[in-house]
Image (spheres, grey):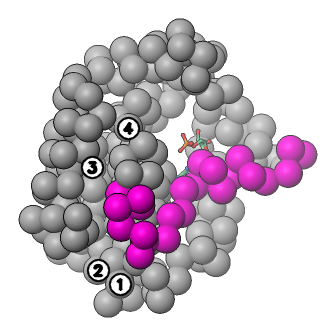
Amino acid sequence: MKKLVLMAGGQGSGKGTMAQKILKDNPNFKYVETGAMLRALPDNSPLKQIMARGEFVPDADLCNLLTEKIVPQHDTILDGFPRQLSQAQWLLMKFANRFDMVAVYLNISRELMEKRIKQRISEGVGRADDADKTVVQRRLDSFFNKTVPALDWMKNSKQIKFLDIPIRDVSIDENYATLTQILCKNNVITR
Ligand code: AMP
């Protein structure tokens, strides 16, 4: 069976950066990122307005889009999903018997998340939805109030291997070294 690797972690955890590094070293993986998938929708899509407010788009819309993208012929990294319990339940129901499922949780403190978001803004590399303080706080709150309980649920599920990766205030390369060591040890990647 192919692998479905769920990359999880709050804003500033380095999720996207780490995923890109894994893909470069392991080109057998296909990459599906819900945020990018949604940003690619036409500007007049009602989902775009929901995103601009920093709210979650409805599960039904996202699950429809994902059903087309996740195919059992490819090892796949899924970035940005699940973000809440209903999504975690849907994912396991739909894919647990078609993939070896692994959750990779980049575990970073709220303090370090806030520090990194501020840094991104001051360096001018933040995204449009990083610039508004209320939106940033809303995204952080929903991570702790909705995503963390979904991750806890997955941690207790027998259908998924759960890897908790400590993300520290050190360089990207140092955090990546910790990550790859754990992923190799668990046969998720080979290098
Ligand atoms: P991201 O780039 O992952 O931070 O996603 C940007 C925005 O897309 C989020 O603030 C949400 O509005 C929406 N989004 C991405 N993934 C999900 C998800 N799993 N559930 C609901 N909304 C999502």
Q: In which quarter of the image is the C terminus?
A: bottom left
Report, in whole angstroms, how far the alpha carbon at label 2 lies from the one at label 4: 24 Å
- Judged by depth in the image, the label closer to the viewer, 3 or 4, is 4
Mark identifier at residue 51: none
Q: What residue type is labelled 4?
A: Gly
Answer whether residue 27 is magenta in the image.
yes
Q: What's the residue at 57%, 55% (across, down)?
A: 34
Which residue matches tag 1? Answer: 2
Q: Identify the element where label 2 is drawn.
A: strand
Q: Identify the element where label 4 is drawn.
A: loop
- How packed mark 1 is, by other alpha carbons closer than 10 Å (few <14, some 14-19, many 20 or more), is some
Image position, residue 119 (x, y; %)? 45, 14
| Left or right relative to 92: residue 164 | left
- Identify the mark nearer the N-term, 2 or 1: 1
Query: In the picture shown, does residue 167 fall above or below 7?
Result: above
Q: Which amino acid does label 3 sit on?
A: Tyr
Report, in whole angstroms, how far the alpha carbon at label 4 lies from the one at label 1: 25 Å
Which residue matches tag 3? Answer: 105
- How packed mark 3 is, by other alpha carbons closer than 10 Å (few <14, some 14-19, many 20 or more), is many
